[in-house]
Image (cartoon, coloured by chain):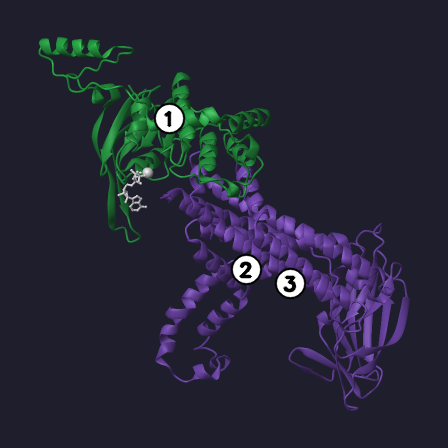
């Protein structure tokens, strides 16, 4: 019965002009935006497609879905078509559930259509990519260094970053172990370097770096001199043989030139195992995005059990926007909390003694804390950042998003059912 | 004792506005009983509380006080709705569906299996005379056609109790006549019909019992025959009698101290005339 309502809801949405316009717009965006010239990096086009789908098209679809789901129940109540449903033997909470399910189905459909289309385009673009740029269409799993030390002279430390002078004065060393847990897994490995560089030879965009990778157990090593750029990480490929089951890898780096410096931390070199799992990874990203849709649908329908159509739309959008700026809301409430302890952390306007500050705690901080506690955290569902770096989305991330959505949606459903049960239909 | 089709006890509804201030009392202390198998007319002028009563029975509104039972169960009971059909006052239907789809949708809400659903939808579309329009979206239907679909959805579950709120509104004379015939057919099938209307002529023909509401208060309730019969008036209906014989009968009655109020040729109603003409030209 819930499904009957859901299918009818879906059918209504699919026959709406709003949705046709939306789908048309989505297709247009996917056709036109890729034609905009990008940087000459070969993989820029692929990145562009990813951004277009996961930000532009998804936002467009979410707007449409919020619009439809927030108005669905109020319109049924306004048009009195709800009489036809509620005079049948169906529990009211099932009507609410049916609405939510219907729009979840709609979201899934939209994501499937646009997601597949986008995937096809990306695969075609990627097939023309040169090998060294195909990282974007792979799924990598990152490993942090188990040990990090500076051998020789440490020039100075500033804000947690250790600076090493070139010409073998000091050497930065990262150690990795336990990289290949399963010997049958033939994944290749690569190291990604994300160093800060400086030079006293005047302004330098690139400096030559001495990089060596040594397998301590096997006494094998490879050394290279690589040009390091200030703004872009560089990658050293180790291949499948480079990392064995018991390998302990030492990666050492120093600037070749004595007047050059590198700034390093433990996190600046990462090891990645590379799989060809782009499609799976992309699917995971779409699933996580779907969870985001699900959450906003549940919230929009919850609001619509009580509010009229326009108010319901507005409030769903407000929750959606605030859910994205949750960090700022949290930060702001923290800022207020800290005003007496760390006065310098406050903007200048708040520094002066102000009677309002005394009340601020109760007027702003407490409400803000509550808001940030109650609001859904949509930032959780950002999977684009993984795809853009070609990083495999950890299953835990998917699982946690799933759990979060289930919990949040469950509570919302419960509240909606209670509200809707109490409603009268004039 | 609770074997009535409908029973209400002290049913009262006060509409309140957003601030919970009283805005109107639509129904006051209504005690209603509808026997199983009868056609019951709920009458009253506009705004007398007929629709309010029906909505209370169906649980669309909650009573301010009082209770109601349908087919022996409290009207809030979900399962009892399986045996109830409802035609709202106006046709509130999904305009984006066509006739087949909407009937199928409502049938699904009763968990009717697929085969049976198809059979019922087909036969109902035929019964309400919409076969040529079955694939047309309801947004392109006329008011009367919508009414017909509304009626079809009300009886899709073969209900024991049918609640019809102004069923003939928007119907053409043939439609009204068919509706009346249909209601009588319901009675033959043993269904109970509750009919809201302020068209007394319609009701008079078909109802067994009626209740009249005014401003939310029950005025009278009882059998139509008892309520309408004037015990001291007798009407003879005679065919093929000459003028002289009529005079003779008249003087015979006057001899026995009876007053002749009127002697008329019974006329058919305008509705009958209209129906006859239209059906003749089909
Ligand atoms: N939502 C509402 N809010 C306030 N008052 C209402 C509301 N709905 C109905 N009423 C009032 O309740 C009373 C009964 O209305 P109801 O719709 O039951 O009348 P009705 O007998 O069905 O009339 P009609 O023959 O016109 O259909 C009227 O006075 C009406 O103004
Ligand atoms: Mg009415």
Q: Earlier in the sequence, mark 3 or mark 2?
A: 3
Kindly report the distance in space between the C-alpha atoms of the residues bearing marks 3 and 2.
20 Å
Q: Residue B32 location, x and y as percent?
A: 26, 28
Q: Chain of mark 1?
A: B
- Image hue for chain B: green
Residue in the picture at 29% in, 10% down: B240
Kindly report the distance in space between the C-alpha atoms of the residues bearing marks 1 and 2.
71 Å
Q: Which residue is mark 2?
A: A377
- Image hue for chain A: purple
Q: Crowdedness of circle 2 by 10 Å Cα count: few (<14), some, many (20+)? A: many
Q: Nearer the viewer, residue A112 or A357?
A: A112
Q: Chain of mark 2?
A: A
State whether residue A326 is above or below residue B31: below
Q: Count the marks: how many? A: 3
- Marking on residue A56: 3
Q: Residue B19 location, x and y as percent?
A: 28, 53
Residue in the picture at 41% in, 70% down: A364
On the same chain: label 3 and label 1? no
């Amino acid at each position: 019965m819930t499904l009957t309502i859901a299918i009818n809801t879906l059918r209504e949405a699919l026959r709406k002009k709003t949705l046709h316009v939306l789908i048309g717009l989505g297709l247009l965006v996917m056709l036109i935006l890729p034609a905009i010239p990008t940087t000459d990096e070969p993989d820029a086009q692929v990145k562009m497609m990813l951004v277009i789908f996961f930000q532009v098209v998804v936002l467009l679809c979410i707007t449409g879905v919020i619009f439809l789901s927030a108005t669905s129940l109020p319109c049924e109540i306004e048009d009195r078509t709800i009489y036809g449903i509620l005079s049948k033997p169906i529990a009211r909470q099932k009507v609410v559930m049916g609405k939510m399910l219907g729009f979840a189905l709609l979201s899934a459909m939209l994501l499937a259509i646009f997601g597949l289309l986008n995937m096809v385009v990306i695969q075609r673009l990627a097939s023309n990519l040169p090998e060294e740029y195909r990282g974007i269409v792979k799924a990598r799993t990152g490993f942090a260094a188990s040990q990090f030390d500076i051998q020789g002279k440490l020039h100075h430390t500033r804000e947690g970053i250790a600076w090493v002078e070139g010409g073998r004065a000091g050497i930065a060393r990262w150690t990795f172990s336990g990289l290949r847990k399963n010997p049958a897994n033939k994944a290749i490995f690569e190291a990604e370097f994300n160093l800060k560089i400086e030079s006293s030879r005047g302004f330098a965009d690139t400096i030559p770096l001495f990089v060596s990778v040594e397998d301590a157990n096997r006494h094998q090593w490879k050394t290279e001199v690589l040009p390091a750029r200030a703004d872009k990480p560089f990658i050293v490929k180790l291949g499948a043989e480079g990392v064995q089951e018991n390998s302990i890898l030492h990666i050492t780096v120093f600037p070749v030139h004595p007047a050059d410096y590198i700034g390093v931390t433990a996190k600046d070199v990462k090891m990645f195992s590379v799989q060809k799992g782009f499609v799976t990874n992309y699917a995971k990203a779409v699933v996580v995005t779907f969870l985001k849709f699900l959450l906003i649908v549940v919230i929009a329908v919850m609001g619509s059990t009580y509010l009229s159509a326009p108010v319901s739309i507005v409030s769903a959008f407000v929750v959606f926007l605030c859910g994205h700026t949750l960090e700022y809301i949290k930060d702001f409430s923290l800022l207020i909390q800290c005003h007496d302890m760390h006065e310098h952390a406050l903007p200048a306007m708040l520094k002066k003694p102000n009677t309002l500050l005394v009340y601020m705690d109760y007027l702003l901080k407490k409400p803000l804390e509550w808001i940030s506690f109650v609001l859904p955290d949509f930032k959780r569902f950002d999977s684009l950042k993984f795809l853009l770096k070609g990083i495999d989305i950890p299953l835990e991330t998917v699982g946690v998003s799933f759990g979060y959505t289930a919990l949040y949606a469950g509570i919302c459903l419960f509240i909606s059912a209670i509200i809707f049960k109490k409603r009268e239909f004039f | 004792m609770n074997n009535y089709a409908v029973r209400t006890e002290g049913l009262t509804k006060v509409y309140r506005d957003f601030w919970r201030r009283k805005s109107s009392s639509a129904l006051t202390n209504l005690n209603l009983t509808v026997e199983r198998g009868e056609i019951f007319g709920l009458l009253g002028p506009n705004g007398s509380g007929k629709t309010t009563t029906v909505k209370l029975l169906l649980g669309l509104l909650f009573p301010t006080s009082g209770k109601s039972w349908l087919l022996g169960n409290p009207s809030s009971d979900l399962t009892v709705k399986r045996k109830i059909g409802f035609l709202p006052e106006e046709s509130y239907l999904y305009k984006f569906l066509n006739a087949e789809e909407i009937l199928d949708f409502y049938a699904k809400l009763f968990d009717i299996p697929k085969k049976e659903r198809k059979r019922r939808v087909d036969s109902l579309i035929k019964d309400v005379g919409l076969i040529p329009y079955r694939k047309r979206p309801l947004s392109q239907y006329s008011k009367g056609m919508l009414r017909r679909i509304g009626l079809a959805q009300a009886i899709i579950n073969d209900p024991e109790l049918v609640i019809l709120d102004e069923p003939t509104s928007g119907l053409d004379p043939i439609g009204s006549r068919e509706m009346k015939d249909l209601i009588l057919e319901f009675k033959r099938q043993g269904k109970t019909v509750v009919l809201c209307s302020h068209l007394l002529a319609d009701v008079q023909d078909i109802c067994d019992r009626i209740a009249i509401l005014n401003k939310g208060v029950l005025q009278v309730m009882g059998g139509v025959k008892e309520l309408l019969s004037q015990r001291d008036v007798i009407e003879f209906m005679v065919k093929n009698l000459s003028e002289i014989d009529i005079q003779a009968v008249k003087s015979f009655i006057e001899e026995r101290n009876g007053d002749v109020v009127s002697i008329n040729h019974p006329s058919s109603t305008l509705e009958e005339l209209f129906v006859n003409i239209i059906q003749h030209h089909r």
